[in-house]
Amino acid sequence: MKNNTADIRRIVAAHVRTGETFEFSFDAVRLLERRRVRAQAQAVFGPGFLDLQCNGYAGVDFNHPHVAPQQIVVAIRAMWRDGCAHVLPTLITASQERLCTLFERLATTLKNHPEVAGAVPGFHLEGPFISPIEGARGAHPLAHVGAASRKFWRECQRAAGGSIKLVTVAPEVAGAIPFIRQLRKEGVLPALGHTMASSRIVAQACDAGAMMTTHLGNGCPQMIQRHANPIFAQLAEDRLVASVIPDGVHLPPEVVRLFHRVKGPERTVLVTDAMAAAGAPAGRYTIGDLDIEVGRDRVVRQPGSPNLAGSALTMDRAVSEYVRMTGVPLAEAWDAASVRPWELLRRAGAVKRTEESCVLGRWADGKLEVLATLRGKRVLWAK
């Protein structure tokens, strides 16, 4: 069956880094042609975004005990309209039984929906091997926080079908350093987070193979020692790539600028730490057993508590906000949301090859408007 030419869309776009101009021709389903042209660009394009930390989306909570497979499919598809072509669905601290059930549900859903599975290179386990200290623990339930347990880990990874590719751990908890070493042997990316670790322990964790900080500047108490604190300890450690939530809520703009200047483009990745309110209106949502409130200001709060509990950030906004806060070129922010997280996963041995993706967008007045998200020859979403 031939395509109706009236249904074919053509966009001339310049590569966000090189400036090379291409014409993309596609219908509602497939990319028909991509050819180099000499023409005025209407848009920009670059690699599809990869979010290493996403707890839910479009009203769907990956951590809820009753989340249905079809809801997971809906959430992942919804990310495509915001340029997020790939994601690590993230589960936070819970009982072993709960986490195993949720990981098994995620794995089964992907097995039954291969078009969605192509968007998910793996899962992220955030906790339960984190600090029990108030503030550092964040919204993670204290009852299930504990020492690093290889048995617990093996059961979760078995339930996930071996698909957990990133684990956030506090290096000061009992058993954490050998656990980090074990993760690297297994080709899993170890990240430090929800921690009160000293610079000495952070260095030990990096010696063992830690490679990333999960949401640097968050997952710690509001009041900390002004010099000897876990933020500076991780910021000063050159072996750690910093993941940053640039929503203007988790970190003030001046802090984001400081992190950028210290870590530089090679050691910075953008994440959303999104929960169900991302890509959804203000209202009441959940993260696991927690009831969460999201106001018109898009701030995610635990009712009656100052604690932040994830964000309502989307990846297209993360790129735009990072440019605004730091003043870097669009290409650098784009790389931090796409190229850099892939590099990190590959260096850890967590992934090998995956199908290339692409985002076409319009950049105007400091905002990125996504026009289409592609993976290989497939049109995931188009405006």
Image (cartoon, grey):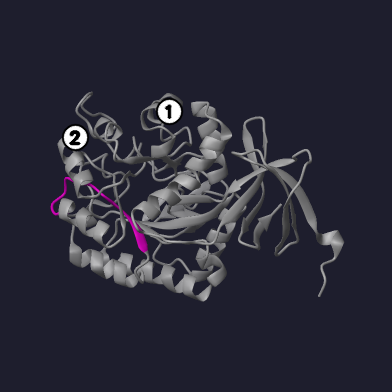
Amino acid at dot 1: Pro
How far from the left and from the top, in percent, is residue 361?
A: 66, 44
Q: Residue furthest left?
A: 174
Element on which disc 1 rests: loop
Q: Nearer the viewer, residue 83 or 91?
A: 83
Find residue 252 and name its label.
1
Is any part of residue 209 visible from this angle?
yes
Residue in the picture at 69% in, 55% down: 382
User: Quick check: 236 left or right of 2?
Assistant: left
Q: Is residue 170 magenta?
A: yes
Badge 1: residue crowd in 10 Å (few <14, some 14–19, many ≥20): few
- The residue that label 2 is drawn on is 199
How far from the left and from the top, in percent, is residue 331?
A: 56, 37
Q: Nearer the viewer, residue 312 or 35?
A: 35
Tell me if residue 11 comes above or below residue 352 in the rendering.
Answer: above
How far from the left and from the top, in percent, is residue 102?
A: 37, 67
Residue in the picture at 52% in, 61% down: 119
Amino acid at dot 2: Ser
Tell me if residue 95 comes above or below residue 335 in the rendering.
Answer: below
Return the disc, 2 or 1, that comes first in the chain's sequence: 2
User: Quick check: 101 left or right of 209?
Assistant: right
How far from the left and from the top, in percent, is residue 347?
A: 36, 52
- Residue 236: image quadrant is top left
Tell me if residue 369 comes above or below residue 129 in the rendering.
Answer: above
Q: Nearer the viewer, residue 213 or 136?
A: 213
Tell me if residue 16 comes above or below residue 326 in the rendering.
Answer: below
Residue in the picture at 58% in, 47% down: 281
Q: Nearer the viewer, residue 59 or 325?
A: 325
Element on which disc 2 rests: helix
Q: Which residues are magenta?
A: 164-175
